[in-house]
Amino acid sequence: MKKLVFLSILLSSNMAFAVSTDAPIVFKAPEGMVCKGDPNSAEGIYCVSENPPVAVAPEPINSPAPPIGNKPDPKMPQIKRRYEANLKKWQARKLQNYTFTLQRSCFCLPEYTTPMTITVNNGKIVSAVAESLMVEIKDDGSETTPKMVDVSDRAMTVDQLFNEIKQAIDNKAASVNVKYDARWGYPRSIYIDLDTRMADEEIALTSTALKPISGNTVIKPLPVTK
């Protein structure tokens, strides 16, 4: 009866060969393979690659994006010095009770760019109102007096304006342009561009008409519409 020898060679396509022969089998390992076993035995030969591929785990789907990278404003040292000098001037005034007008410029709804009148007591906002853009028409066709609406959700104190500038400096913004009030030191206009390659993320704020309030003054907020 003839010998039946199975040669099992693990290649990329995993193939098994059956060889029927009476003569002793002389076997040579294929190039790049390592073989074990006896070709003349019932078990045959088992071969594997010398350099099996190494599995590489895929990157997580929610892996953080690489940093955008940004060239900071080349005038940043000067910007920082002016910020520190005017912050010191503002803090020296110790002004905690005041009113002023703040207006934001942005690519947003018109109601967010309407000038707002902000009242601050003890360093905290107690009133922030803006003129409503809604127009009501009387029976005779004339317009009613514009109502004042509460905008305290987007109002800022002068100290918070300084914080906006500090964050821009700390984050090495691409462009920082600030004009300060000569007397009080508070920022009258702020323009910040965090990254020139990103659109619609610029910050532009204008503050005017700052007036101190006596500590004994009783503040009566204007009637507002929620």
Image (cartoon, rainbow, N blue to C red):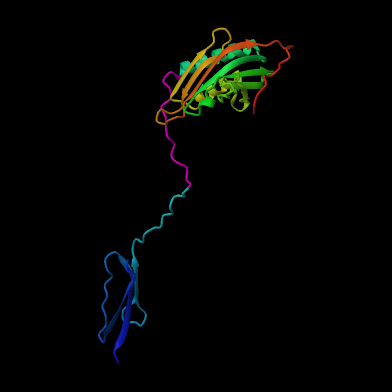
Q: Quadrant of residue 38?
A: bottom left
**Image quarter of the C terminus:** top right
Instruction: Point out residue 143 in the picture as x, y percentages from the top left corner.
Output: 57, 20
Instruction: Point out residue 11 in the picture as x, y percentages from the top left corner.
Output: 32, 68
Q: Quadrant of residue 98?
A: top right
Q: Quadrant of residue 125?
A: top right
**Is residue 159 on the magenta stretch?**
no
Which residue sits at x=54%, y=22%?
Answer: 114
Measured along the vertical axis of the image, is residue 154 above or below residue 33?
above
Measured along the vertical axis of the image, is residue 200 above or below residue 185?
below
Does the magenta stretch mainly form a helix, a strand or a loop? loop
Measured along the vertical axis of the image, is residue 46 above or below residue 224?
below
Q: Which residue is the extreme one toward the top?
A: 183
Taking depth in this image into account, of 128 and 14 the one nearest to the observer is 128
Which residue sits at x=60%, y=23%?
Answer: 139
Instruction: Point out residue 177 in the picture as x, y percentages from the top left corner.
Output: 46, 18
Which residue sits at x=31%, y=66%?
Answer: 33
Residue 163 placement, left or right of 59: right
Measured along the vertical axis of the image, is residue 218 above or below residue 196?
above
Taking depth in this image into account, of 68 and 14 the one nearest to the observer is 68
Instruction: Please tell me how many numbered marks the rendered image carries.
Output: 0
Which contiguous range is marked in magenta?
A: 62-76
**Image quarter of the N terminus:** bottom left
**Is residue 63 on the magenta stretch?**
yes
Taking depth in this image into account, of 220 and 95 the one nearest to the observer is 220
Residue 118 placement, left or right of 180: right
